Image (cartoon, grey):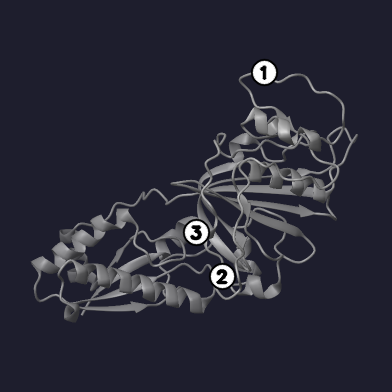
Amino acid sequence: MRQSHLLIVSASLALMLAACQKEPAAAPDAPANEPAPVAAPTAPAAAPVAQVVDVPAVVADTGFSVDKVAISTAPLPPFPFFDIPDGLVAKIKDDSSTVDFGRHFFLAGKKLIPVEGRLYHNSMSLISQDKSGEYTPLEFHRNYENAIQALGGAKINETQFTRPIVDEVGGLREVNKFWHSPPPTSGYEHHSYLIRTADKEYWIHVGTSAAGKTGHIVVLEKTAMTQSLGFLDAAAMKSALDADGRVALYINFDTDKSTLRPDSQAVIAEIKTLLDSNADLNVSIEGHTDNTGSADRNRQLSSERARSVLDALVGLGIAPSRLSANGFGSDKPLADNVDEAGRAKNRRVELVKL
């Protein structure tokens, strides 16, 4: 069972927040090598001065940008940063609350953005285990907001959920596949935050359900998935093209973008070797996605990713006349999209012999 207080690493920051405690009763001195607990405020509290990040306003015509969140220089505690608020009990045990690679949608600006990486999620009743006290949704949200600001983070959502926001990414059914908080609909309060360091992004989602008196927390460290499928070398690609006329390749891109990740360069290099070794071979580069999100967005994304592969090959000296690029979105799956294994298999780029 996780300790029952909301923690931040710095004892000095904890002391600044101590004025927001739910009750004035004195607490035992914390050991010098451990952070002090932060209790829930009974009224809106001023955010701590240290490490608070001022985020420029995001206007509707430009949308949300990660670059508008200032880089934090605050020392961060171990992931996932926060313990359960004082007096409350986590519903999910430690050994089940964190996955090495997952996805969650975050409200950013006025839209939902899917983010992937190491993911922690938990929920708790806002009524203390001994029934002696209760956190209001405001207290619960304010505790996390103050602690996140103390770590150099900032709130990034400008709205609450609406039907159009959810429909834009494929509807409620698609969002729920990767959802770890109260329902993404009106009537529930949701806030998203971002802690941005020099080399990491930490996305945080805090949600409450007033009717059910529950609180939820999601902390995601944005990372690329460690590729467990080995890639084919040029000879294996040639064999597959000769036998089937096509070969599926698993090339890593940034989430919901067509930007090739650095670890994709080895696959691109093997495609170049294939084409250099077979001067009469022309190929169509075809992008495919899983079924997360809208069909139109998936077709656009798959087309852009195929074009990125084509451009990378042209940049390495392959003649453009030997290549074409097309995107089919989720229209041609290789596996069911019911679980992550199937969706991962469907997110691919195929070379098709012309």
Write the residue at 81% across / 41% down.
41
- Mark 1 touches mark 3? (CB < 8 Å): no
Q: Nearer the viewer, residue 341 or 217?
A: 217
State whether residue 319 is above or below residue 182. below
Distance from the alpha carbon under mark 1 to that under mark 3: 38 Å
Residue receiving disc 3: 67
Q: Amino acid at mark 3?
A: Asp
* Rendered residue at 70%/63% (across/down): 184
The residue to which callout 1 is attached is 31
Decide which of tag 1 and tag 2 comes sooner along the chain: 1
**Residue under the image location 24 percent in, 55 percent down:** 266
Point out the frontmost of discs 1 and 3.
Answer: 3
Quadrant assignment, res 157: bottom right
Please tell me which of labels 1 and 3 falls first in the chain: 1
Q: Is residue 4 visible?
A: no
Q: State whether residue 118 is above or below residue 86.
A: below
Dot 2 surroundings within 10 Å: few (below 14), some, or many (20 or more)? few
The residue type indicated by label 2 comes to Gly
Dot 3: element: helix
Mark 1 surroundings within 10 Å by alpha-carbon count, few (fewer than 14), some (14 through 19), many (20 or more): few
Q: Is residue 75 above or below residue 105?
A: above
Give the answer, above or below, for where 56 lies relative to 139.
Answer: below
Q: State left or right for residue 68 relative to residue 279.
A: right
Mark 2 and mark 3: span between their CA atoms?
Answer: 12 Å
Nearer the observer, 128 or 35: 35
In 3D space, how far apart are the residues under numbered discs 1 and 2 (Cα atoms)? 45 Å
Q: Measured from the top left, where is residue 287 in percent x and y?
A: 36, 72
Which residue in the structure is indicated by mark 2? 63
Q: Amino acid at mark 1?
A: Pro
Q: Quadrant of the C terminus?
A: bottom left
